[in-house]
Structures are given as structure tokens and as C-alpha cells.
């Protein structure tokens, strides 16, 4: 089992920035991928960004050039730097970890982009 705890969400104006952080605990020795999902009301949960242990990254097209995912393997943390935020980015953001074929998500942190 892996436990994930997110932090850093909040309210920001369009064009602003936020940095989300996630700390993993529990069975943390075989985590392959970590990343972030998000879900807005009435919408499907979507993958935002993924990073492997080796540092390879992937982003959903809508955030490319604006969001940056990073990972500290020693600290078992993953961050998401979000710049140039848009109202369309408003959602609950969930930290994600993959252990073999098992998937884990945190409780989520609210990000609201509004003027």
C-alpha cells in the first residue's frame, strides 16, 4: 500500500501560478511512475502529468509549456509547478503513484482559477 498526501492548492487569478506537492509513504520502494490527475465537476478524471523514476515526463496537451512536473526519488515527493493558469485548469488535483499494476491516488487538493 502507498499513501499519498497533496498540498499547495488554492485560489489564484488567471495567469497566476501555483506549486503542488505530494509526499508518498507506506510501500514506497517499488514506485515506478508518479504524477498528477485532475477532475472538474461533471467531467472525467484526466491525467495531467507523469514522471518516471528515471525522470521521463509526459503531459496532457492542454498544459504543455505551462506546467512542469518534478520528482525527488530520495524524498519520495513529486511536485507540479503550474504557471499561466487558466480558468479551465480549475479542478481537484490528485497525486498519483503506480506500483507494478496497482494505482494509488491521494485525497486531492482544490485548485481554483478565477478572477
Image: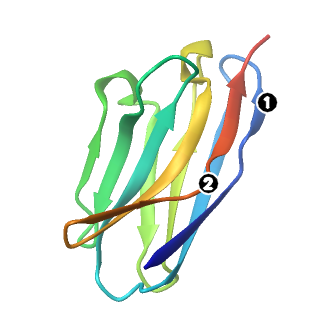
**SS at mark 2?**
loop
Name the residue: 68% across, 34% down.
Answer: 111
Above-or-below relation of 83 to 14: below
Residue 104, percent from left and from top: 41, 62
Closer to the N terminus: mark 1 or mark 2?
Answer: 1
Q: Label 2 neighbourhood size at 10 Å, few (<14), some (14-19), many (20+)?
A: few
Q: Residue at x 64, y 48 (%)?
A: 19
Q: How many marks?
A: 2
**Percent from the top left, x then y, of residue 64?**
35, 30
Name the mark nearer the viewer: 1 or 2. 2
Considering depth in this image, is 55 or 36 the residue closer to the camera? 36
Picture residue at 37% right of the left edge, 22% below the top: 62
Contact? badges 1 and 2 (CB < 8 Å): no
**Which quarter of the image is occupied by the C terminus?**
top right
Q: How is the image coloured?
A: rainbow
Quadrant of residue 82 within the rendered picture: top right
- At which x and y percent is residue 14? 68, 16
Q: Quadrant of residue 46?
A: top left
Residue underneath mark 2: 107
At mark 1, the secondary structure is strand
Dot 1 corresponds to which residue?
Answer: 11
Disc marking residue 84: none
**Residue at 46% from the left image edge and 31% from the top image edge:** 66
The residue lying toward the viewer, choosing from 42 and 58, is 42
Amino acid at each position: 500500500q502507498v499513501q499519498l498526501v497533496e498540498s499547495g492548492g488554492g485560489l489564484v487569478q488567471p495567469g497566476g501560478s501555483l506549486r503542488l506537492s505530494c509526499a508518498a509513504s507506506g510501500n514506497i520502494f517499488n514506485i515506478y511512475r508518479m504524477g498528477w490527475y485532475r477532475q472538474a465537476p461533471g467531467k472525467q478524471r484526466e491525467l495531467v502529468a507523469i514522471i518516471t523514476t528515471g525522470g521521463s515526463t509526459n503531459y496532457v496537451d492542454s498544459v504543455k509549456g505551462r506546467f512542469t512536473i518534478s520528482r525527488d526519488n530520495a524524498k519520495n515527493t513529486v511536485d507540479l509547478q503550474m504557471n499561466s493558469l487558466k480558468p479551465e485548469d480549475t479542478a481537484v488535483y490528485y497525486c498519483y503513484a503506480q506500483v507494478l499494476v496497482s494505482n494509488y491516488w491521494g485525497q486531492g487538493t482544490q485548485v481554483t482559477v478565477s478572477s
